[in-house]
Image (cartoon, rainbow, N blue to C red):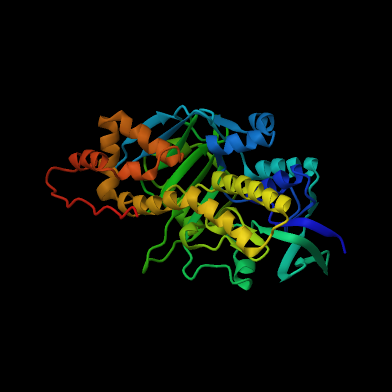
Amino acid sequence: MELYDVIVVGAGPGGAATAAYLARSGLKILLLDKFEFPRDKTCGDALSPSALSILDNLGLTDDLRNAGYRVEGVSITSPEGKTVRAPIPVHPVYPSHGYVVPRLVLDDLILRCGLRAGVQFHGSTHVLGIERDRAGVTVVAETGGSQRRFTARLVVLAVGANVRLLQTLGLTPRRMGYAHAVRAYFEGVSGLSRSLEIRFDRAQLPGYGWIFPLSSDSANVGAGLLPRRGRKTPGASALLAQFLSDPRLGPRFQTAHRVGPVKGFPIRTDFQQSRVFSDRLVIVGEAAGLVNPFTGEGIDYALESAQLASAYLVECFKREDLSFEALRGYERALRRRFQHVFVFSHWMRRQYMNPFLLDPLIRACERWPELTDLIVRTLLTYADPAEAIRPAVLLKVLRCLPSARSPRTPNLPATN
């Protein structure tokens, strides 16, 4: 039986990028996915500047320029309908733009990058289980109507929000954190610009709607919702219809038509308590809960965790140490990079995603443009989310509350 250095399960951005990086280092890599490519994936399709930086490192800049729609700013609309706009800020490393690229195209581009690096890919392969022993790992899968076994020294799981395999391995947290989202493609949309539109008007809170342009008159349109206890989550079509029912959006969609179905999808936002490694196994991307709980962004986190995991694993292979303790270093590196971000992003979601503070926040952004810049930098993970809850920021927000109200200042979270 052929022995691989690493088997990667899941060929989304996190899995395919991990496979590509590992293959570039000279390791023998097998990538498995239950679908043949190209295949569609339900998503907002927006690529942040930080994601572009990693994709550039994979040699995909020209492909993205040809396949994507360049965006250069962000607009945010409050529940009461006020809108603030800001350009994508200048960054010392990242470009001052993003792209909107359908996942049908993006995931195939990253996969082909891995194939050029020497990755072996098997589509239409459904992984049933993983067996581990001292010699390595055996992946049991069904493909072509029969069962096959693949062996490797280590496995990377990049299975996104599909937790069945993680559950069989005992790698899901006790309490899983999910958001729900829905998207559809529309053509004939008017009023589009080179900005990503984030809208809280007519979106269920905590959550938001989005309009991400794919061209001058077509867009990925969607809405996300974070569930609350005791509240029934609406179906995908109902969630999108509620967002699009805003009278302000009516004229923009008057001549528009939907292309393809309305698709709902779950989003895992529980990195804080997620397992990210085990014996002979590491986890990247959304399978590790790496979707921002405030923004719903996951592609850049998947790519960065892929970059971090592959660099760490290459060193483990060089030392010929794939022990449990050696792999614990990956978790430490991942926590150093993201734990603080997720703690404060969860807090921002709880405090700001309600009309009581969202409306004053956008009013404050109108009065103090530097606050708009801070919010955009926070959304793009340029800024520490703790900056958005500094007393100076909260004071500006509170100054924009209706004068008839006398709110109590929110309790700040502990930082230790």
Q: In the picture provided, is 184 more to the left or to the right than 281?
A: left
**Quadrant in the picture for the C terminus:** bottom left
Along the line of sight, the residue nearer the viewer: 58 or 367: 58
Number of numbered discs overlaid on the protein picture: 0
Foreground pick, 319 / 330: 319
Residue 5, image quadrant: bottom right
Would residue 335 appear left or right of 132 to someone viewing this image? Answer: left
The location of residue 52, given as percent across then percent down, is: 59, 35
- Is residue 100 visible in the rendered image? The answer is no
Q: Where is residue 406 in the image (x, y as percent from the top left)?
A: 13, 49
Picture coordinates of residue 51, whole percent (x, y) = 57, 39
- The correct choice, above or below, for 155 with respect to 55 in the image is below
- Residue 256 visible to the viewer: yes
Q: Residue 219: where, in percent of width, then height?
A: 54, 38
From this viewpoint, which residue is outermost toward the front? 319
* 393 vs 414: above or below: above
Quarter holding the N terminus is: bottom right
Relative to residue 236, is residue 64 drawn left or right? right
